[in-house]
């Protein structure tokens, strides 16, 4: 799972803290420090806000709260991928990866 972040983003910091509390493993992609990563994220999701989560076969560019995002991540991890059935359980906005 990749988490696209900006270092000073309070939503990013909160999400990473909740992921750590849930003992979920992730790779941080700093879109400020790593050239081209912001463009990569936008190309995948069509959006520029952070945090964005790339997991399984989707990217999540928008969500209700960081807590509900973690719940959606756990649902996706349990299923291994997102299909129509899994999508019905999610509260976050998802974009399928090409």
Image: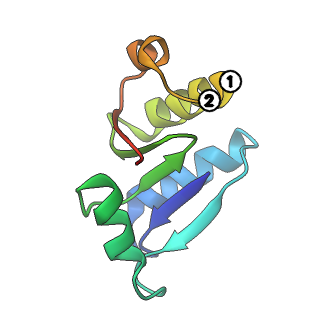
Instruction: Determine which quarter of the picture holds residue 89.
Output: top left
Q: State yes or no: discs 1 and 2 in contact (Cβ < 8 Å).
A: yes
| Residue 10 in the image, given as x and y percentages of width and height | 40, 62
Q: Image point 57% across, 57% down: which residue?
A: 2
Q: Image point 56% across, 34% down: which residue?
A: 73
> Mark 1 sits on what residue?
78
Q: Image point 45% across, 67% down: which residue?
A: 5
Q: Residue furthest front?
A: 98
Are there few (<14), some (14-19), or many (20+) residues within 10 Å of tag 2? some
> Mark 2 sits on what residue?
74
| Residue 94 in the image, given as x and y percentages of width and height | 35, 36
Nearer the observer, 28 or 58? 58
Left or right, 31 with respect to 17, comes to: left
| Residue 80 in the image, given as x and y percentages of width and height | 65, 29
Nearer the observer, 85 or 72? 85
Nearer the observer, 4 or 12? 4
Where is 24 relative to 41, above or below? above
Tell which tag, 1 or 2, sits nearer the viewer: 1
Under tag 1, what secondary structure?
Answer: helix
Under tag 2, what secondary structure?
Answer: helix
Q: Which mark is residue 22?
A: none
Are there few (<14), some (14-19), or many (20+) residues within 10 Å of tag 1? few
Where is 52 relative to 4, above or below? above
Instruction: Determine which quarter of the picture holds residue 90.
Output: top left
Measured in 3D between alpha carbons, the distance from the residue under mark 1 to the one under mark 2, in whole angstroms, is 6 Å
Nearer the observer, 5 or 38? 38
Left or right, 83 with respect to 96, comes to: right
Where is 97 relative to 87, above or below? below
Left or right, 52 with respect to 28, comes to: left
| Residue 52 in the image, given as x and y percentages of width and height | 41, 54
């Amino acid at each position: 799972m990749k988490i696209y972040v900006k270092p000073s983003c309070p939503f990013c910091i909160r999400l990473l803290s909740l992921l750590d509390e849930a003992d979920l493993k992730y790779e941080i992609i700093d879109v400020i420090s790593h050239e081209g990563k912001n463009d990569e994220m936008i190309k995948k999701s069509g959006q520029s806000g952070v945090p964005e989560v790339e997991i399984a076969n989707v990217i999540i560019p928008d969500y209700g709260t960081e807590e509900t995002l973690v719940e959606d991540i756990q649902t996706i991890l349990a299923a291994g991928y997102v299909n129509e059935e899994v999508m019905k359980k999610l509260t976050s906005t998802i974009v399928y990866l090409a």
